Amino acid sequence: MNSVGAIARTPNAKHRLSLRYDDERLPFLTADQGSRSNGGTSTTSAATTHHAVAPESDGSKYLKIGLYGLINAVILVPLMISFSQIIFRDPVFQPYLADLVKLTMVSGAVHQICFSVLSTLPFAVGQVQDAGLIFLSAIATSIVHSLHKADTVFVMEEVLATTLFTLCGSTALLGVALVITGKLRWASFVQYLPMPVVGGYFAFIGFFCLQAGVAMMSGKEVKEITDWAQLTDLKSFYLCAPGIVAGIFMWVVTQRIQHFTILPMCMLTILALFFGSMAVSGTSFQDARAYGWIAPLPNATMNFLDIYKHFQPSHFHAEFMLDQLPSWIAMYFVVAFSSSLDVAAIEMALHKPLDHNAELQTVGWSNVISGLTGGFTGSYIFSSTIFSMKSGVDSRLTGVLVFALELALVMSPFSIISYVPKLFFASLQTLIFVDLFMEWIVHARKSMYVSEYLIVWFTFVVMVLWNLQAGIVLGIVGAAFNFIVSYVESTSIRRVWKQSHVKRQFKERISLLKSRGSIVTLELDGYIFFGSSVNIMAQVRKHVLLTTDELLHQRSTRSLSTSVMATPNFNSHRLHGRTSTRNNAATPANMGLMALDDMNEYLSEYSADAPIPACRTRFLVLDFDRVTGIDVTAVRSGFNMIKQMLVENGISLVFANLPKHIEAMLRLHDVFDDNDMNTNSCDNVPTKAFETLDIALEWCEDGLLAKEVPVSDSASRLLQSGRIMQLLDVLLPKGGGGSVEHVGGDKVDDVTGPLYVQTQSFEKGQLIYTCGGDVDGFYVIGKGLVDVYLPSTEHKKMGPGFTGRKRIMQVTNGGLLGDVDMILNKKHSFTAEARSNCFIFFIPTAAMDTMKQQHPNLAARFDKAIMRSMALHILEVRVADE
């Protein structure tokens, strides 16, 4: 049904929208109407022109406006009466309910004329809406209680004046706030109210409507959940049961039969059955009023101006308005949020983007005018708006007709509620209850996590058992707590396998491939706070590995129960007096690795003969590229502890991509030692920080190579002795045999080398080749360091967001350069620049072709070097998490 404007983004809501608005048996929107609704530009394609009907005559057009305007009025007028009884549900207002009902109808009429004039949608329908209804009721009840508790005795005129001035003033101020929100284009910010809290609030609206309807039918005061005990007598059952059954009946029928006439027909059926029963039983209106079926007659004939007689400034007590500020603030957010959802629902059905900020201003101005005329909060009634749109009504006259009909009923001299049974209005309130309760309590479970669904229930129960404001505040607190828990449990840290972009000689690359497991790289995401530091510490323990001998040595030198490396798993074995036999067993030759978080179990799946074996951790790299911030608790309880644990076990802690403010925070709390940032040595396990992850990994790899491969500067030694070609021979892979004298030999020396190889020296900063330059061969780095990068001018050409020079790789001793471009027979893709003084071998393409004919075995060594380098690069890329 959802005729009151509250919407739910649940699977059930989407299903109902598709059935109700896409498949209703309504007239087709003509091509001419489609053009007008889209600013005069026809959007009807040639393929769909056979659906368009002939332009209707003026008589048919006005008949349609009258028909759909009447249908909307038939639905909306009873709702306005029901809403009035909800706002003024306190028993002190009952003698004045006839005037207050008409005041609510005036407010609905004002909203309608405002939306008809100001909205960008010519078919817009706006009325007093349920979103702010409960807050108005809470404010009215609060003022009554405050006046009763005051030392001064107040007459009823003062109660009415203070209540009405506060309600209309709150409405006008709400409108001003909504206009400002739209002007500042803050419509998206008000949607930050957690959806589960809104769901609990909408469910409470339904319960509140049911409770108000039951109180109206029974004639008893039902404000708290404990007051329902008063309804156990037989008379209350007779008075309430028909209205509740009728409301459930309307909900079932409107769900099963998708047609725009169903709801009005159900309403007319209820009235027909009631008045038919009165005629059959011979019950008069006086008898029905006496028993409680119909509200009593007012004391005098009603006049239009009588609805404003209670606005007496002399009876107004402004000192009670400030107490309603919390309710007003909550009402602002809820109404703004609900209005944004209404606009979104209309936008979805219209298949046309709407300016949410402009529409929010329309809602704001409507509330300003409504408040100034003594009315109450309102917004779009999205179901009626979509109903008018789907019916092909694109005239503002439909809204004007609804306004005129509501105003005509207000100006009538009789009270509507004195002739229409209470169960009729209560059935509408029950319909609202069932619709909202099914939407937000039953069907919402399909579209929410369990924790969010519990917040819906928590918010709803707090509102029912305590009050509205407490439910919203505690619901938001619960949603915030749920976010913290979910954020902590989410994967904020993960292990990745990455390598630097340094292209080294083949022997070093093979060594790094086997020992790269010694570098543990962890990527951190999001904001690191006190809740996530524990998870980070646990992940570090999980991924850092030590040898068994080191762990046994730790156990013999100190108690693990006091160590920062102690784990619950290990200590639990000690507490229960169990000792693992594996701890005393000899370490297998092909093993020797232990995980810090499971010290009693060998990692049997790790094997030394694996292609990429697990290794004892030497470096822990923390990548902060996706980290947005950090708090002091995470620094003190997290990273200081991690540093202490790693240093004690000879593991270097390395930070990469540290934002400046995070680096300052870490330095402030002594995560870095004084000399950490000023040394390039890998000794004494320093804690270091690097600008990028690539540079950090390069530093770690240099450290591994210094430990794994004995440092010997053969390049410098051979160059100083003048044996230049012997250096190239050392860098190339071994051949299949041959002699230097034989024309087919595979050795590179001073005889064969100069035939095909050119030697070049480059100073630091000198370009070797440029991006886009012609390819005439490839290079082998004899000694030095070369940066390969994409220049900023070419980087920008890739599209928006790409700026600056992009580093591709770095090539060092023994690495090949330009080989890929040569094989692809294209221009150079990047620029190569000497990062240090370099000595480089250059093999031209023509010389390579000659070598294949004159010295095929030597050419095969070059081909093997290229193929082996590329194959290893493919393996490295496949293993790495890029």
Image: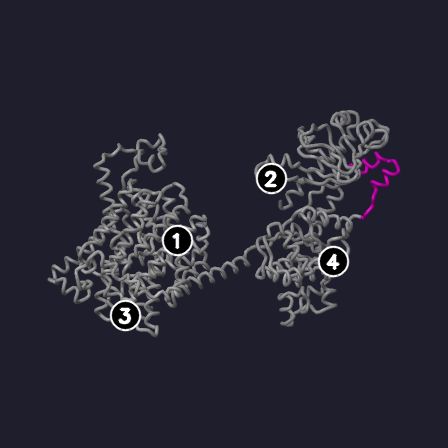
In the orientation shown, which residue stands out farthest toward the right?
Answer: 721
Quadrant, the C terminus: top right
Q: Which mark is residue 674?
A: 4
Please, what secondary structure does the residue beneath circle 3 have? loop
| Pointer 4 with pointer 3, Cβ within 8 A | no
At label 1, the amino acid type is Val
Which quadrant holds residue 441?
bottom left
* Residue labelled with disc 2: 802
The image shows residue 519 at horizontal and vertical percentages of 69, 52
* Residue labelled with disc 1: 176
Instruction: Decide which of tag 4 and tag 3 comes sooner along the chain.
Output: 3
The image shows residue 461 at horizontal and vertical percentages of 39, 65
Which residues, given as a range, are shown in magenta?
710-732
The image shows residue 73 at horizontal and vertical percentages of 24, 49
Give the alpha-carbon distance from disc 1 to disc 2, as whole Å: 43 Å
Q: Give whichever of 318, 837 is nearer the camera.
A: 318
Give the alpha-carbon distance from disc 3 to disc 1, as whole Å: 32 Å
Please, what secondary structure does the residue beneath circle 1 have? helix
At label 4, the amino acid type is Asp
Number of marks drawn: 4
* Residue 733 drawn above or below residue 418: above
